[in-house]
Amino acid sequence: MRELYSALVTPYNAGGEFDPTLLEGLLKFQKKQGLDGVYVGGSSGEAVLQSVAERQAVLKAVAEHNPGLKLIAHVGTVATRDAQSLAEVAERAGYSAISAISPFYYGFSEDELFAHYTAISEASALPLIVYSFPQKGLGLSRELCDRLLANPKISGVKYTSADLYMLDQLKRAYPNKIFFNGFDEILLAGLTMGADGGIGTTYNFMGDVFVTIRSEWEAGNQSKALRLQGIANDMIERVYPSIIDGTKYVLARMGYQTGRARAPFQPHDWTAVPGLDAAIDNLIAWRESRK
């Protein structure tokens, strides 16, 4: 089974503080959509805008309110010691895996990145999924991937790139490792080129669309899968100006309050986006028609 995980948003109250009381409904909604799990504390969860203590609290609270989803904890930080601390929290909380984006800002060498990931992998007994995101300057070269994937504790890659040739080459070279497609808008293409599943922001509110894309693709119904990918992409285009805040707006329209994205993100007037509310209504109607 190719597994799909929502890159879970972090629910905030009106004051912009993490509110664990909002998690139960949000997590049950992820489960109801048919998703396999949630990826907690990543960029969609605004982890880089949170203190380490807040991130620990989020990891613990998600585990406490978990309705039976698989849990992957994103523990990536610039400081190796903080990532190790978060990995330890995730293990104690019962997560099934950890993941980490490359440390940013300083322009670390590949040897430094290798040492960083090795140290994280040794901080807990959980398998580590490294995270490659070239568009943000956080890509992992093929050479570094080869070094990292030789580590038996590194189970795979969250691959957020449109370079599907490299994805294909990695999967052919490492058939026993797991590769997650990271761009929602090319899930179907990613599956075709070897991805073992996907992790996505917009899965928060239309995970069932992506679950259906997976099902149709696995059944050989390429035209249906492509049509659904197009429907998903139309929605993605409408929330793309600020995808985290946009995702929170759509969730609110569906009855799940998660607040707004934290500063320096600026509040977006989503009611002014042409066609967005109509697209949300159509998505809700599609969901109701499947009951």
Image (cartoon, grey):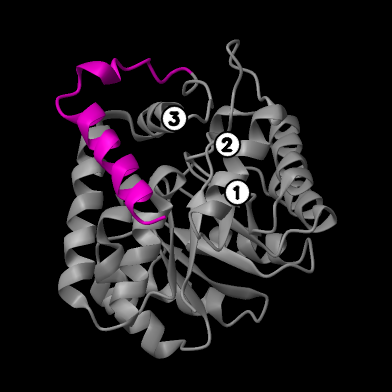
Q: Nearer the viewer, mark 2 or mark 3?
A: 3
Q: Position of residue 222 (x, y in %)?
A: 19, 76
Q: Give the CA separation, mark 3 to mark 1.
A: 23 Å
Mark in front: 2 vs 1: 2
To which residue does mark 2 refer? Answer: 47
Disc 1 designates what residue?
76
Residue 245, image quadrant: top left
> Disc 3 or 1, which lies upstream in sequence?
1
Pick the front one: 238 or 85? 238
Q: Residue furthest right?
A: 92
Residue 47, picture quadrant: top right
The relative height of residue 290 versus residue 271 in the rendered view (above or below) is below
**For mark 3, what is the residue?**
248
User: Which element type, helix, strand or loop, lies under badge 3?
Assistant: helix
Task: Give whichever of 269, 154 is nearer the camera.
Answer: 269
Q: Position of residue 27 (x, y in %)?
A: 61, 45
The magenta stretch spans residue 288: yes
The 10 Å Cα crowd at callout 1, few under 14, some 14 to 19, many 20 or more, is many
Residue extent of the magenta highlight: 263-291
20 relative position to 174: left or right: right
Foreground residue among 18 and 277: 277
At which x and y percent is residue 121?
70, 66
Q: Position of residue 20 (x, y in %)?
A: 71, 30
Residue positioned 39% across, 34% down in the render: 247
| Circles 3, 1 touching at the beta carbon (< 8 Å) | no
